[in-house]
Image: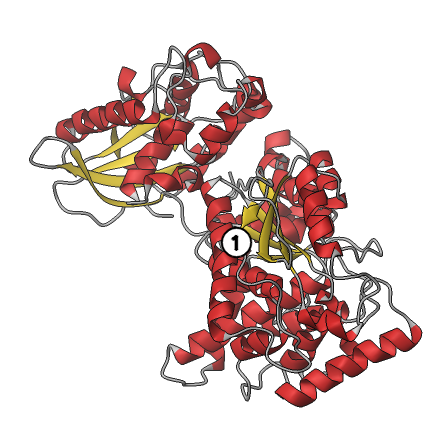
Amino acid sequence: MSASPRVAESGTRILLVRHGETAHNAAGRCQGRLDVPMSARGEMQIRRLAARLEASGVLRQLSAAYTSPLTRSWRAAQMLMDARVDEHATVIVEDDDLVELDYGSWQGTTPSEWPPGAHRQWQLDPWSMTFPEGESLAAMRTRAHRALARITAAHPGQSVLVSAHGHINRVILLDALRHSPLDFWSIRQHNAEAWWIVCTLNADGLPEFLSAERAEAPVTEATAQHAIDGKTKPLGALGVLESTAVRLARLQQTLSPRIEAARICVFGADHGVTAEGVSAYPRAVTAEMMRNFARGGAAINVLARANALDVEVIDVGVDADLPADMDIQHARVRRGSRNLLHEGALSAGELDAALAVGAEAVQRAVRAGVDVIGLGEMGIGNTTAAAALLSVLTGQPSSRTVGSGTGVHGETLAHKRAVVDGALARHGTRTTIDDRAISARECLRRLGGLELAAMAGAALAAKRHPVVILADGFISTVSVLAAICIDRETAGDAHDGEHDSAHMDGRATALMDQIFLSHRSTETGHALAIDALSMLAGRTLRPLLDLDMRLGEGTGAALAVPLLRSAAAIMTDMATFSEAGVSTGDHEAAHGATPGATSP
């Protein structure tokens, strides 16, 4: 664990902790300055944190403790300081400036009870909000800095505990990490998590932040596996949920992962190849479905509502005049791609623009505090483009990549395969997934489409954030495969063209760790796309669901989110044998001890 960050002699090291969960947290209520105690679950969270921090020696470094006067924060500070071994008692100082954001007359409410438009404003522009009879984030930030200035002045060169709340800690971390105010919601500090921040005072007596880092050691696969193995169950009894929980812990870098907000991004675009008669539906259906999405009547809208998900619909290339006031993101690059049978689907500039549309969607999601981004699509003709892209990336024939799509069979299916064969003959192909005769980026430009490129751009942009990218079915999986290939090739180019496979695989694996496959589609090429991803990942990838689905829109991703939430909850909330007082039997011997791991 990170026992102490390296700092200048005069810097004050602050262990910034958020209290454990309360009943209001669990219910999504704005507790603010209400004196709500931690729940039993919240106290368990703090006990676990205290055990880990004491085992690593962090708590023994603390020479002072400060807390908000609210019970939940004070109790967390008390539990942490009491967990120190062979240490004298430390007075816990209450500081009114560390209290949580004042929601005023809205305290105790849920956002659904706020006036129309208020919750959306809070999500999109929280700094513009001043709560009725309460305060703004700017006012809270001012008093947070005031408190930190007093603490820093009183304890130069010392390590100090500060126990506080979600929003005030988020503002402190926002400044300590030097992030934009627009990134407010992207700052993640779950209940009972700790960060080291280091600050000194500037010439004006205000805190100047020197560094910020998590207070616990990086979560490795070994430590996460050790944690899940210690839960009250036979080893491996929860199957894929356990391996999913391990992956989430590594991605979020905490043994208490959370999957709360999730968003399905549905990218819409048309395809010039529809002129070849490859679909059972006319091109106009793309625009008609975009209107259906905006009205909330499509399958993805229904499944999102059933599973408490957000849906964002993005026009990246629909060949229609969609109303400016339609409830979608208007980001059209061009009105549909070109006919890939006769020319490249996109120009280089259009490809860049479509990749940027996907990146911007990820940035919006991250800034909204989203933990999971599902990739959905809508575009008549896009199974043809995806099949051609999969063939060119892998060197596999159209017989393995082209399926029925919207429902073509017989002669029409044979014609669809012939169109893909013709496109490959025109544009060329690679022999294997590792063949760089044609770059992955160029493959996407020649044979992809605007929504495929946008989904690839989303996956590439997600590397900078600890979010899950949840691929839907065939089309989004091929887009993710293209992104992984682009990422590997970019990593190679960054080293002057040296083909260092170990290095490139390392970069691919870093992005691959964020990619989760929601379901196994019945579309012909999906199995091949999964196999290609598995080869790049160096392990067999297994979709979470197999429901004989092939709709697209992000519907499979919407259904997989509850499984991700369940996996995170198992890692975070399930008791260990020692916590529950349950005998281990032969489990303890089988479980063993993981080097470097500490049991809470």
Q: Is 210 situated left or right of 289 in this image?
A: left
User: Which residue in the structure is indicated by mark 1?
Assistant: 331
Q: Is residue 162 above or below residue 267?
A: above
Q: Residue 24 in the image: state x and y as whole percent.
A: 54, 19
Three-letter code, disc 1: Ala
Instruction: Tell me where residue 419 appears, x and y as whole percent.
Output: 76, 80
- Place residue 383 in its image quadrant: bottom right
Viewer-proximal residue among 365 and 169:
365
Front-most of 504 and 330?
A: 330
Camera sees residue 377: yes
**Number of disc labels:** 1
Residue 507 lies, with reference to residue 54, above or below; the image says below
- Look at 20% across and 24% down and name the residue there: 146
Whether residue 563 can be seen here: no
The residue sitting at 22% across, 50% down in the picture is 6
* Residue at (44, 75) in percent of width and height: 490
Expressed as whole percent of the image width and height from the top left, the position of residue 258 reads 56, 39
Task: Using the image as rendered, state which of residue 586 and residue 548 is in the foreground.
Answer: 548
The quadrant where residue 429 appears: bottom right
Tell me how the rendering is colored: secondary structure
Q: Is residue 23 above or below residue 346?
A: above
Q: Residue furthest left?
A: 203
343 vs 75, left or right, is right
**View extreme (front): residue:** 321
Q: Secondary structure at mark 1?
A: loop
| Quadrant in the rendering for residue 447 | bottom right
552 on left or right of 349: right
- Structural crowding at the residue carrying mark 1, measured as other residues with C-alpha within 10 Å and reported as few (<14), some (14–19) or many (≥20): some
* Residue lying at 13% horizontally and 29% vertically, measured from the top left: 153
Residue 430: % across, % down: 62, 86
**Residue lying farthest to the right in this orientation:** 410
Decide if residue 5 is on the left or right side of residue 519: left
